[in-house]
Image: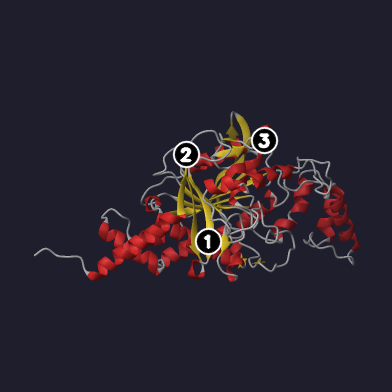
């Protein structure tokens, strides 16, 4: 007698079908974009993923598939800095497949292909996180309030749910990536995913239902454990903030290395400031005088890139690098653009490149909408050094925001062995920067500086950063037993 599907299985199928219909309404394939002539020569998907209590926080994302081999190339989950920086900056100014063509002026915004796009070698998810960033929003009042720890929790939930919606990417090598302030959060997210896999943590009930049903309906669908484990390989950090004291404190040594302050100023600070160059103690006159000299010598230096002209935002006659950002605001606030990328109308007010209310600055206290509750990520790096994990730390050697000096210091504190000594890497036959590789058992850390780059490494040196990331990916051996 032929067996018939049980009532429970039919219920699962009904739940699955309903869920997938919701997903279909949340995902859009974008074929054309205002400003670009013709169809897009790459696969662009936009959509929302609900996270948090009752999925009240709706995170907007752009997903660009690799133009080389989407089925096997790495999958990067990329979190912009800030916090509160829109993913659109990363997408259109840095590593995405398109750039603004600034030669045509602000009144004729056009998009051109980026010859140095990381999406030539990787699938990349660009996400606006937390709510209040870019096009992401909350359906509840509480959802607009976030913190470092909440952001990390929502990021992990996003990754799981994204893989549920995109099961064909479950076997791709997964990397968690971020820039600047996300140096505090990316190691935490990465570590907690590794630890969850080791515990055998399962996804939420809805995800279990979906994958259990899919496994019954389609024999080749990955197992339930696959979604909880994913295929996490490691993390990528660009110009990371690792410790809110040590990284800022390292600016003094960096300024001396770059000849921005005199030997006398540096030596006096070293001798009398007792290792604290951030806070001026008026009672310690010798230290205070040396730090005032430091301030005098660096107050008109552009910390994001010491080679760039210092820009006074209060001077209307001065054209600042930040003025380029106005192009993104004009483009993203266009109704035609928002229709093209399927933004839910009425969910946000004016789109902003960064949410200044939650954006972190040195010494900034918690705001009404964001708590900066992670001070250092060093202990996450330390724990990750005992995992089967790869990491790439990329820094511009002309970045004074979070200088490479501080990065060198915390890497040294990990007590890793040197696998490859300091040496140059090349781009078009010229030195593009320098790199060294550290290792401990199954953990490896590659630290690279990009010559002439500032804080936003791919923005200042797009070709060199592309060469670097491609070289690093090619050095990874992806196999089932790695």
Q: CA distance from mark 3 to mark 1?
A: 32 Å
Earlier in the chain: of badge 2 and badge 3, it is 2
Residue for badge 1: 58
Earlier in the chain: of badge 2 and badge 1, it is 2
Are dots 3 and 1 in contact, CB under 8 Å?
Answer: no
Residue displayed at 68% across by 54% down: 406
Other residues around mark 1 within 10 Å, as few (<14) / some (14–19) / many (≥20):
many
Front of the two marks 2 and 1: 1
Q: How is the image coloured?
A: secondary structure
Q: Which mark is residue 102?
A: 3
Earlier in the chain: of badge 3 and badge 1, it is 1
**In the image, residue 361 lies at what x, y percent?**
73, 58
Q: Which mark is residue 373?
A: none
* Image quadrant where one finds the N terminus: bottom left
**In the image, residue 463 lies at what x, y percent?**
59, 35
- Please tell me which residue lies in front, 375 or 431: 375
Q: CA distance from mark 2 to mark 1?
A: 25 Å
Note whether residue 442 is visible: no
Other residues around mark 3 within 10 Å, as few (<14) / some (14–19) / many (≥20):
some
- Please tell me which residue lies in front, 86 or 152: 86
Q: Which element is circle 2 on?
A: loop
**In the image, residue 318 lies at what x, y percent?**
82, 41
Direction from residue 479 to residue 253 in the image, left or right: right
Are dots 2 and 3 in contact, CB under 8 Å?
Answer: no
Direction from residue 161 to residue 210 in the image, left or right: left
Residue displayed at 85% across by 48% down: 297
Q: CA distance from mark 2 to mark 3?
A: 22 Å
Instruction: Quadrant for residue 9, please give it.
Output: bottom left
Residue for badge 2: 42
Q: Which element is circle 3 on?
A: helix
Direction from residue 236 to residue 268 in the image, left or right: right
**In the image, residue 333 lies at what x, y percent?**
63, 49
């Amino acid at each position: 007698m032929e067996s018939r599907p049980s009532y429970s299985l039919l219920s699962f199928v009904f739940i699955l079908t309903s869920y997938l219909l919701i997903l279909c309404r949340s995902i859009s394939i974008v074929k054309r974009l205002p400003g670009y002539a013709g169809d897009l020569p790459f696969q662009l998907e936009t959509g929302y993923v609900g996270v948090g209590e009752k999925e009240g926080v709706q995170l907007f994302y752009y997903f660009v598939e690799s133009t080389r081999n989407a089925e096997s190339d790495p999958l990067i989950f990329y979190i912009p800095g800030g916090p509160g920086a829109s993913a659109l900056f990363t997408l259109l100014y840095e590593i995405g497949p398109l750039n603004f063509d600034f030669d045509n002026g602000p009144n004729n915004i056009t998009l051109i292909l980026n010859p140095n796009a990381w999406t030539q070698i990787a699938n990349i998810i660009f996400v606006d996180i937390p709510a209040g960033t870019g096009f992401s929003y909350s359906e509840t009042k509480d959802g607009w309030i976030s913190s470092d720890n909440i952001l990390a929790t929502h990021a992990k939930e996003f990754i799981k749910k994204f893989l549920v919606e995109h099961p064909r990417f479950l076997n791709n090598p997964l990397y968690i990536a971020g820039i600047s302030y996300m140096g505090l959060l990316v190691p935490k997210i990465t570590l907690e995913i590794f630890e969850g896999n080791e515990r055998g943590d399962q996804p939420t009930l809805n995800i279990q239902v979906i994958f259990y049903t899919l496994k019954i309906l389609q024999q080749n669908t990955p197992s339930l454990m696959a979604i909880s484990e994913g295929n996490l390989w490691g993390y990528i950090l660009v110009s990371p903030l690792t410790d809110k004291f040590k990284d800022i404190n390292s600016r003094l040594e960096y300024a001396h290395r770059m000849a921005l302050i005199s030997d006398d100023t540096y030596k006096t600070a070293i001798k009398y400031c007792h290792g604290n160059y951030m806070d001026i103690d008026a009672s310690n006159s010798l230290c205070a005088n040396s730090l005032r000299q430091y301030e005098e010598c660096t107050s008109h230096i552009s910390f994001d890139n010491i080679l760039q002209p210092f820009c006074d935002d209060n001077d209307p006659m001065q054209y600042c690098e930040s003025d380029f950002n106005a192009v993104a605001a004009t483009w993203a606030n266009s109704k035609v653009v928002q229709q093209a990328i399927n933004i839910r109308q009425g969910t946000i007010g004016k789109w902003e490149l960064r949410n200044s209310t939650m954006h972190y600055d040195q010494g900034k206290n918690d705001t009404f909408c964001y708590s900066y509750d992670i001070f250092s990520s060093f202990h996450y790096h330390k724990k990750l050094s005992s995992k089967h994990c790869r990491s790439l730390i990329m820094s511009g050697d002309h970045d004074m925001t979070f200088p490479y000096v501080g990065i060198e210091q915390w890497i040294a504190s990990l007590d890793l062995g040197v696998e490859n000594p300091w040496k140059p890497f090349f781009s078009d036959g010229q030195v593009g920067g320098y790199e060294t590789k550290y290792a401990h058992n199954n953990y490896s850390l590659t630290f690279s500086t990009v010559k002439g780059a500032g804080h936003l490494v791919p923005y200042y040196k797009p070709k060199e950063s592309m060469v670097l990331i491609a070289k690093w990916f090619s050095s990874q051996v992806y196999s089932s037993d790695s």
